[in-house]
Amino acid sequence: MNKNLLYKMLNIFLFTSFTASLTAQISDPAPYCAHTYGSMYIMMEDLSVNDFQYSIGAAGNLGDGIDFTYYNNVEFPEVPAGSSVDIDINFYQVNDVGAIYFALWVDFNQNDIFEDSERVLENSNTIMDGVISNADPDAPSNVNSAFLVPLDAELGPTRMRLARGTNVLGNDFFAPYDNNFSMTACTVDPTGFLQGNVYDFDLIIIDTPDNIGESIDESPIKFYPNPASSELTITTGGDQSLYNEIKIVSMEGKVVLEQQTNALSTSINIQNLEAGLYYIQIFKDSQIIASEQLIKN
C-alpha cells in the first residue's frame, strides 16, 4: 500500500477515535438516581467552572425528547479541597412556562447519592427569582455565583449534577416562582408531560498542596471567639506574621468579608453578617494556608 495513503488512513482513524472519546456521553445515570421529565430538551446554553466554559448545545424545542446525559469526558479544571469554585450558567428562554427552577449538586462524599446538603446552588441562594422563560422574559438568564469545596471532601472524580425544571410538588405546576421550593436531585415527573433537563459532569477534586488548607486547630494561626457575634480576632502566636489576607466565605462560596493585613494580631468586625455558618480562610501571598468553619451568632 502507498505509504502516503497509509499515513492518511492512520491519521483519520486516530482523529476519529480521539474525537469520539472527547464527545463520549452516557445516558444511564447509574449508580446515581434518575432525574426525568416527560419532555426533556436543551434549556441551558453553557456551564463554566472557574472560567472553563462547556457549551451544551443549541436551544431545544418541546418534543425533542432528549435523554439524560452524563458528560463523562468533559474536563473541567481541577479544584482543591477547601477552595471556592466559580460557576457561571447561561439559560435559554424556552417556550415552556414551568421550568423556572435550577439546582447544582456535588457528591462531595462520593457515596453515589446527591444529598440535600450537597445542593450547592439553586434559585434561592443566587438569583432569588425564576429562570427566564416565555412566561417571564425579563427573568434572569444567567447565574454567576460560587460554592465552597469542603476541606474533608473525597478526592478524585466527583459527580456533579445540573438540572432545570418545574415545581413538581404543588397542584399548579405553572404557578409563579416560589422562593421556598428546592429541586430534588432525583425528581420524577408525576404527570409525564412536564418539561426540564438534567446533565451530570465530573468535578475533579484534588488535595491542597503541602500544608495549604490545614485546619486552623493544627496551625500556629488562631482565631477567637467561635461562635462570635461582633468581633473576630486572628493571631499568629509568634513574632512574625504568617499571613497577609483574611477572607470570610459563606457556605455558598461567596466572599462576604475580606481584609489585607501583615499584623501579628488582627480584629475583624463581623457584626453586620447574618447569623449562620461561614468559613474563615487565611491566605499568604494568594495561597490559602488555613481554613476553619465559623459560627456567627
Image (cartoon, rainbow, N blue to C red):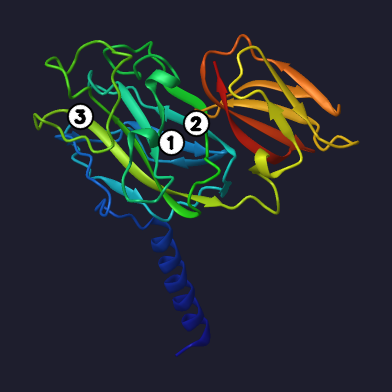
Q: Position of residue 107 (x, y in %)?
A: 39, 45
Rounded to the nearest angstrom, the CA distance separating label 2 from label 1 is 8 Å
Residue in front for this viewpoint, 288 or 8:
288
Dot label at residue 206: none
**Residue placed under numbered mark 3 in the picture:** 195
Most foreground residue, 80 or 55: 80
Residue at 91%, 36% in the rendered image? 239
As helix, strand or loop, the secondary structure at mark 3 comes to strand
**Kind of residue sitting beneath label 2:** Asp
Residue 113 spot, x, y in % from top left: 31, 46
The residue depicted at 66 percent of the width and 23 percent of the height is 225
Residue type (three-letter) at the residue carrying disc 3: Gln
Could you classify mark 3 by the number of other residues whose Cα lies within 10 Å: few (under 14), some (14-19), or many (20 or more)?
many
In this picture, residue 235 sits left or right of residue 111: right
Label 2 secondary element: strand
Q: Amino acid at mark 1?
A: Asp
Q: Is residue 296 left or right of residue 120?
A: right
Q: CA distance from mark 3 to mark 1?
A: 18 Å
**Do labels 3 and 1 touch, CB within 8 Å?**
no
Which badge, 2 or 3, is on the more N-terminal residue?
Answer: 2
Image position of 175 with respect to 208: above or below:
above
Residue 288, placed above or below residue 72 = above
Mark 2 and 3 residues: CB-CB less than 8 Å, in contact? Answer: no
Q: Label for residue 46?
A: 1
Quarter residue 183 falls in? top left
Chain-order first, disc 3 or disc 1: 1
In the rendered structure, the answer to whether residue 73 lies left or right of residue 186 reads right
Evaluate whether residue 61 shows in this view: no
